[in-house]
Image (spheres, rainbow, N blue to C red):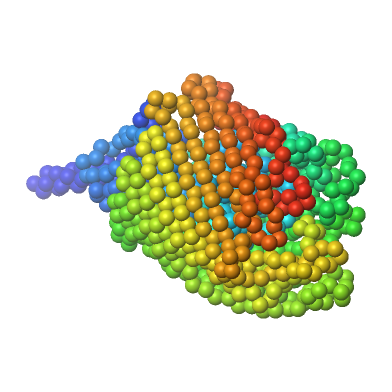
């Protein structure tokens, strides 16, 4: 008599478990509202449910183990408007959601520190530039690629040596992050470029303004966050081949990669090479020894499970950059026009870079651990005299960040970044000493989330030590050299507190207002503290100052954007106050005919404005017009203009997108007009720079061959063969112009 009630109870229990299982699993498909095609690689997340998913190549994903009902999920995808959706107890086990395309593509997903969010959901000003776009525009390197963005320029020493300038700041005031690790290749000298290739890069995210809270030292002016290419599709092996040609330098670039994902493991390997001869200016005059080239190989191995994502990357690169020995080399006997020999003075930079980026998903929080080693060897070879400078910089880094959603309105992040470096000289000449350098920090960041208001604040404490070592006699012991006979060892200890306070106010359709106050800092580098030597690449003699103090800045930034479906307008104004700004100042003395420069400090002020327009007419859907304008001024408290401040710039582009067919996709034709104003607000050792204009054009698209894709683009830069030099070109002091007309052909074949 008890069997029937027992069976009934088991049936009820079974049905309850079955119902719970159905409720706990939801299959989700994301489709484009315009054409009902599945949207791959969209991000699905929730707080505090700690869901982190990505749709597959057909737009599907499965949400398992739903423990909180109702559950609000966020859906984000570049090129589409973000969306939220609520899963409740009566939800069917399969959902189809349609996302609307964002015609302006302005609210991309960006990374700030270790946080991923939409651009509108952070108080920071962040720009995104894809590697694909840089290649379509015919960029010769990373600095050249990002220099077309508002507020961004490049300080160049020819076509191959350049470094980014963000709002008038460069060098050790701009931090470069490569695969989650701070990148340092001794680019403190003007003739030392960033030297990074775009091979295997997905995109660059540019943070404008101080970002020391998450990034620490050298993030005073901004951050370049270089992000690795995406892993292969699930269960797929993907192969691609790329080639590029540059007519002005007769330059060739090739790279090839293979990547695979199988289960929880993914890996890939990529290799590339490039070689460029000397460039010619608008008068077809060859600039001797402006050649450059190099090779790179990169391997990636990763693991992705529900609890852990680990991506480990190794990069080896060997690059050569020719430079002017002195002004007399301009009249030196030239070699063959397309020679790529490096018998003349040049830099050789060898890099070994290993990084490990790890995210551990805990029960109700996540832990990010990034560690890496960077071994950088920079040599200066002065032709027949052999290796002169030979510096080896070893960097060991570890950063840890713990993040937790306290509730639906508050996110908390705690972290620490630590770094240890050693610099050693192995050459016959020493201009910066052997040294040991260490940094440590702790920070806290709180983010308050409401429907239309994001508020964030943080505080960070840093310590930094620099110990220079006895490094022998300078310049073969010449006692006539000013400033001393030996490099005198010193030990310096710095500590500082920095923070940020900002908000982003936005509505669902039209407005985005950002107000941000942040601070940054950096300690003097080895060159500024202890340099005492001749720099052939910059044709000057530099003397450091061991009494330099820490440099700090305080920045106020106001950003306002109005956007509709077919038009976007923005304006961004900032004011940057510097305490103990470090820069080079010429003296009245010479050494061997070269001017002697000293490192000095003064309080300074840099302010500027950036504005832009993006027009996508409703009745002319195939057309897109963009324009941007930026203006910046920098001076000391004594009203002396700071050096290397970019000129005003107006940038316009008109783009036509062809109708998509079954075989041809994303085809376009564009023309770009750049007008750079005269720069007459110059430092006392600078000269005025004349205004100039550039016309650029490009055409390209994707062609489908069965399951494979062919990418092709042709870019023609400086179409009118303008003869000019940019104010931030260091060649202008030798009367050398920038590059003339340059045709670029870019081809990529992707096997799927």
Does residue 266 appear anywhere in the picture? no
Q: Is residue 299 left or right of residue 565?
A: right
Identity of the residue drawn at 60% across and 78% down: 493
Q: Nearer the viewer, residue 631 or 206?
A: 631
Does residue 236 sit above or below 585 in this rendering? above
Q: Position of residue 568 (x, y in %)?
A: 41, 40
Identity of the residue drawn at 47% across and 28% down: 623
Quadrant of residue 620 within the rendered picture: top left
Does residue 306 sit above or below 37 in this rendering? below
Does residue 143 appear anywhere in the picture? yes
Q: Position of residue 463 (x, y in %)?
A: 55, 74
Q: Is residue 47 left or right of residue 461?
A: left
Q: Position of residue 494 (x, y in %)?
A: 58, 76
Identity of the residue drawn at 63% across and 39% down: 693
Q: Nearer the viewer, residue 509 or 646?
A: 646
Q: Nearer the viewer, residue 514 or 492?
A: 514
Does residue 495 sit above or below 191 in this rendering? below
């Amino acid at each position: 008599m008890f069997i029937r009630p027992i069976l009934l109870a088991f049936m009820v229990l079974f049905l309850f478990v079955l119902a719970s299982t159905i409720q706990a699993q939801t299959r989700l498909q994301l489709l484009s509202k315009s054409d009902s095609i599945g949207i791959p690689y969209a991000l699905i997340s929730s707080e505090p449910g700690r869901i982190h998913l990505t749709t597959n190549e057909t737009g599907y994903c499965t949400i398992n183990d739903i423990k909180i009902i109702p559950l609000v999920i966020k859906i984000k995808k570049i090129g589409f408007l973000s969306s939220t959706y609520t899963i409740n107890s009566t939800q069917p086990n399969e959902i189809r959601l349609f996302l609307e395309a964002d015609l302006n593509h302005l609210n991309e997903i960006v990374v700030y520190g270790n946080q991923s969010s939409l651009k509108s959901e952070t108080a920071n000003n962040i720009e995104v530039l894809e590697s694909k776009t840089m290649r379509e525009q015919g960029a010769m390197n990373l600095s050249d690629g990002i220099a077309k963005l508002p507020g961004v320029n490049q300080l160049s020493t020819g076509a191959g040596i350049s470094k980014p300038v963000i709002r008038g700041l460069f060098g050790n005031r701009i931090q470069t992050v490569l695969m989650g690790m701070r990148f340092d290749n001794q680019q403190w000298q003007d003739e030392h470029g960033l030297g990074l290739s775009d091979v295997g890069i997905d995109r660059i995210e540019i943070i404008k303004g101080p970002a020391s809270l998450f990034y620490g030292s050298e993030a005073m002016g901004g951050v370049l966050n270089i992000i690795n290419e995406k892993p292969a599709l699930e269960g797929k092996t993907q192969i691609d081949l790329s080639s590029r040609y540059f007519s002005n330098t007769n330059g060739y670039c090739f790279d090839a990669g293979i990547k695979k994902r199988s289960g929880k493991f993914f890996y890939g390997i990529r290799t590339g090479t490039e070689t460029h001869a000397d460039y010619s200016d608008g008068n077809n005059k060859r600039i001797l020894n402006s050649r450059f080239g190099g090779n790179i190989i990169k391997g990636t191995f990763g693991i992705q499970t529900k609890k852990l994502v680990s991506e480990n990357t190794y990069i080896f690169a060997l690059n050569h950059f020719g430079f002017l020995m002195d002004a007399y080399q301009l009249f030196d006997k030239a070699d063959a026009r397309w020679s790529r020999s490096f018998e003349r003075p040049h830099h050789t930079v060898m890099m070994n870079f290993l990084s490990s980026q790890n995210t551990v998903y805990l029960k109700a929080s996540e832990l990010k651990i990034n560690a890496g080693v960077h071994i950088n060897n920079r040599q200066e070879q002065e032709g027949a005299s052999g290796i002169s400078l030979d510096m080896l910089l070893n960097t060991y880094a570890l950063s840890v960040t713990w993040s937790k959603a306290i509730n639906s309105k508050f996110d908390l992040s705690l972290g620490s970044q630590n770094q240890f470096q050693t610099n050693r000289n192995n050459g016959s000449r020493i201009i910066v000493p052997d040294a040991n350098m260490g940094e440590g920090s702790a920070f806290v960041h709180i983010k308050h989330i409401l429907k239309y208001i994001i508020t964030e604040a943080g505080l960070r404490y840093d310590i930094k030590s620099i110990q220079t070592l006895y490094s022998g006699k300078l310049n073969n012991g010449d006692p006539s050299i000013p400033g001393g006979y030996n490099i005198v060892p010193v030990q310096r200890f710095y500590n500082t507190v920095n923070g940020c306070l900002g908000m982003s106010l936005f509505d669902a359709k039209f407005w985005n207002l950002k107000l941000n106050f942040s601070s940054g800092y950096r300690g003097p580098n080895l060159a500024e503290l202890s340099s005492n030597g001749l720099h052939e690449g910059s044709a000057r003699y530099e003397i450091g100052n061991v009494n330099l103090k820490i440099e700090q800045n305080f920045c106020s930034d106001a950003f306002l954007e109005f956007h509709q479906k077919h038009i976007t307008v923005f304006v961004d104004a900032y004011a940057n106050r510097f305490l103990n700004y470090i820069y080079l100042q010429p003296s009245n003395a010479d050494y061997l005919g070269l001017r002697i420069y000293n490192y000095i400090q003064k309080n300074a002020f840099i302010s500027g404005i950036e504005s832009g327009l993006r027009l996508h007419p409703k009745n002319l859907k195939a057309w897109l017009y963009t324009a941007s304008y930026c203006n910046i001024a920098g001076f000391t408290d004594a009203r002396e203009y700071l050096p290397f401040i970019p000129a005003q710039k107006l940038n316009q582009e008109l783009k036509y997108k062809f109708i998509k067919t079954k075989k041809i996709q994303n085809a376009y034709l564009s023309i770009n007009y750049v007008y750079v104003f005269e720069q007459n607000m110059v430092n006392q050792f600078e000269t005025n720079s004349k205004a100039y204009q550039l016309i650029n054009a490009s055409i390209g698209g994707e062609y489908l061959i069965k399951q494979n894709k062919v990418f092709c683009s042709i870019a023609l830069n400086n179409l009118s063969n303008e003869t000019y030099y940019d104010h931030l070109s260091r060649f202008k002091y030798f009367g050398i112009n920038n590059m003339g007309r340059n045709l670029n052909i870019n081809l990529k074949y992707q096997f799927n």
